[in-house]
Image (cartoon, rainbow, N blue to C red):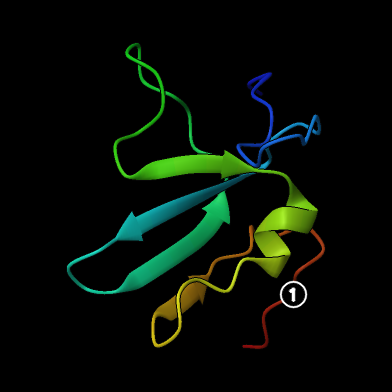
């Protein structure tokens, strides 16, 4: 795991979510922390801690999509 801290000013928690912004589509995607490239963060994305990511609603009128990582305790009905 990366040792990146939350992108919110003043927050010192570790980032464990990635927020990706698509301005053209007015879309905000919140998901598991993505690895940073050698150049740093993924373009259009930034890391947030869990509390800040959970509260992030985006600008008024934007769609927010949240992906939660699957856990090993998830079961599937067949």
Residue 9, position as x, y percentages in the image: 67, 37
Label 1 sits on residue: 75
Q: From the viewer's side, name the closer residue of 1 and 12.
A: 12
Residue 19, position as x, y percentages in the image: 49, 52
Q: Where the C terminus falls, by quadrant? A: bottom right
Residue at image location 44% in from the left, 24% down from the top: 36
| Residue lying at the far top of the rendered structure | 38
Q: Is residue 6 left or right of residue 18?
A: right
Q: From the viewer's side, name the closer residue of 9 and 38.
A: 9
Image quadrant of residue 67? Answer: bottom right
Residue at image location 32% in from the left, 44% down from the top: 44
Q: Where the N terminus falls, by quadrant? A: top right
Residue at image location 74% in from the left, 75% down from the top: 75
Q: Is residue 62 left or right of residue 25?
A: right
Residue 27, position as x, y percentages in the image: 34, 72
Q: Is residue 24 above or below residue 37?
A: below
Q: From the viewer's side, name the closer residue of 34 and 53.
A: 53
Q: In this view, does 73 lie to the left or right of 62?
A: right
Q: From the viewer's side, name the closer residue of 33 and 48.
A: 48
Residue 72, position as x, y percentages in the image: 76, 56
Residue 70 in sight here:
no
| Residue lying at the far left of the rendered structure | 24
Image quadrant of residue 31? Answer: bottom right
Q: Is residue 38 above or below residue 2?
A: above
Residue at image location 62% in from the left, 66% down from the top: 56
Q: How many marks?
A: 1
Circle 1 — which element?
loop
Q: In this view, does 58 lie above or below 42?
A: below
Residue 43 in sight here:
yes
Q: In this view, does 75 lie to the left or right of 68?
A: right
């Amino acid at each position: 795991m990366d040792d990146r801290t939350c992108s919110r000013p003043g927050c010192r928690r570790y980032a464990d979510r990635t927020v990706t912004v698509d301005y053209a589509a007015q879309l905000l995607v919140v998901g598991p922390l993505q690895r940073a490239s050698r150049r740093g963060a993924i373009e259009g994305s930034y890391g947030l801690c869990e509390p800040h990511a959970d509260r992030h609603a985006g600008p008024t009128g934007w769609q927010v999509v949240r992906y939660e990582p699957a856990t090993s305790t998830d079961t599937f009905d067949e």
